Amino acid sequence: QVQLVESGGGLVQPGGSLRLSCVASGSINSIYGMGWHRQAPGTQRESVARITRGGTTNYADSVAGRFTISRDNAKNTVYLQMNSLKPEDTAVYYCNAGIADRSWSYRDYWGQGTQVTVSS
């Protein structure tokens, strides 16, 4: 019954910015680590950024200094602010979260993905 829903993707020019959001809803007891992954055509899915419940962050080398991950625990939401976008950032972006539901069953959940296209 737990769901993650991403939003905020779209078409932007190189050098532009986007902010992605992902909201968790449903029968949630606790949310632990959250993160963003992306997958471009013909490639494997790769980790982009992650954040612990306490706010500790990690980034892939390819996005460090340009992207910022954050979360609002009261809103069950994780964000990805993307600045100085490059064509190679084009991909479907997925959020994920480790969640214990109200029966205390724990597992990783994934959203459906949102398309980000960087092109002139």
Image (spheres, rainbow, N blue to C red):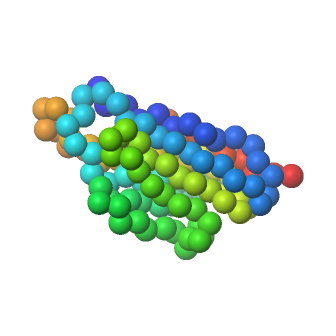
Residue 111 in sight here:
no
Residue at image x 86%, y 52%? 120
Picture mark count: 0
Query: Residue at image x 54%, y 56%?
Result: 44
Residue appearing at x 71%, y 59% in the figure:
85
Res 67 quadrant in image: bottom right
Tell which of 48 and 75 is nearer to you: 75
Quadrant assignment, res 9: top right
Viewport quadrant of the N terminus: top left
Q: Quadrant of residue 24?
A: top left
Q: In this orientation, does residue 100 appear? A: yes
Could you say where residue 64 lies in the image, as x and y percent from the top left? 56, 71
Position of residue 57 measured from the top left corner of the image (x, y, whole percent): 41, 66
Q: Position of residue 95 (x, y in %)?
A: 46, 46
In the visual, does 73 lie left or right of 12? left
Which residue does the image show at 72% across and 47% down from the upper left? 117
Q: In the shown orientation, is residue 11 left or right of residue 46?
A: right
Left or right of 26: which side holds 77? right
Image x and y of residue 69, in percent: 48, 57
Q: Nearer the viewer, residue 112 or 17?
A: 17
Q: Nearer the viewer, residue 68 or 93?
A: 68
Residue at the farthest right position: 120
